[in-house]
Structures are given as structure tokens and as C-alpha cells.
Amino acid sequence: MHEFPEGLRHYVDDAPQVGRVEAILVRPQKRGDVQLTDSWTLGDASVDHGAERDKRQVTLIQAEHIDVIGKLLGRAVPWTDFRRNVLVSGLNLDACLRGEFSVGDVVLRGTMRADPCNRMETNLGPGAYLAMLGHGGICAAVVQTGTIRVGDVVRWRG
């Protein structure tokens, strides 16, 4: 987790930014086909799946970055091709790497950037890896279980 620089924390704590869940995508099997859904129930957060997997329990991508990636590639790209779980808008996801945030009644902790992998070149075509750098979203660990729904508010908790 990255901390905010000394003296700037109050800008984050008082931030009016509130995001919204635009869409949800799940994969019943690793590397399996993705499925759009209106809600996603996240199970017991106390289950230890291994340190690396726990860091990647949920992946989120910022809707505003989909357009940026498309412009860098020179074509429109469907957000589902990125294979992230939750599409959000209206909130800088990078700020969520510095603490906890709520998505509806679920609480997540930002753990790392969801940097592109070599599969993005396959999914999106040549240039996708470079276009996604800095725009691939974030990974998060589940702190408090519950259900994420399309339309839910996404809010920084600190």
C-alpha cells in the first residue's frame, strides 16, 4: 500500500469524489469465459487463498480509462476485453491503492496496480500492452464481504 505524502492527507480525507459501479464481469473458472452480471456476492474474506491470490481477489478498471486506451490504440475497445471484474466511473482508482474503499456494502483494500499482461496483446491486438500501462486498473483484497451491484456507490474510506 502506498501512503499519501505528509501534509497532503487532508486533501484525500475531504475529497468529494464518489464513484459508481457501471458494470460487473465475473469468470466462473480461471482463464474461462467472462460473464456480465448485475450483482456479485463476495464470500468469506477470512479464507486464506495464498498471499498473491488474496491481493487479486477483485480487479477494477476506471471507465474513463477505457476511452484513453481506445484512443491510444486508434479504435474503440469493449471494456469486457480487459477481463477486469468491476467497471467504475467518477473516482480516481489509483487513489484507492492507498487504503480501503467501499463498493456498496463490500469493503476492499487496494493492493496493487492491475498492470497489463501478455494476454492483452491477444485480447486487444498489437500495442495493447503499452496503451494499458497506467490505465489497467487496480487489484484489491476483500476486507468485508457482501454483494456488489451495478449502480452501487464507490467511496474512499481511508
Image (cartoon, rainbow, N blue to C red):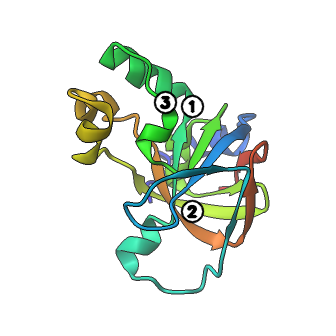
Pointer 2 local density, CA inside 10 Å: few below 14, some 14–19, many at least 20? many
Identify the mark nearer the N-term, 3 or 1. Answer: 1
Q: Nearer the viewer, mark 2 or mark 1?
A: 1
Q: Where is residue 141 shown, x and y percent of the image?
A: 53, 67
Checking the image for residue 78, the label placed there is: 3
Q: Nearer the viewer, residue 68 or 112?
A: 68
Disc 3 secondary structure class: loop
Amino acid residing under circle 1: Ala
Amino acid residing under circle 3: Pro
Q: Quadrant of residue 12?
A: top right
Checking the image for residue 63, the label placed there is: 1
Q: Quadrant of residue 41?
A: bottom right
Identify the mark nearer the N-term, 2 or 1. Answer: 1
Q: In the rendered view, does 57 fall on the left or right side of 74?
A: right
| Residue at (39, 49) in percent of width and height | 114
Disc 2 secondary structure class: strand
Q: Nearer the viewer, residue 86 or 81?
A: 81
Q: Quadrant of the N terminus?
A: bottom left
Q: CA distance from mark 2 to mark 3?
A: 26 Å
Q: Nearer the viewer, residue 37 or 49?
A: 37
Identify the mark nearer the N-term, 2 or 3. Answer: 3
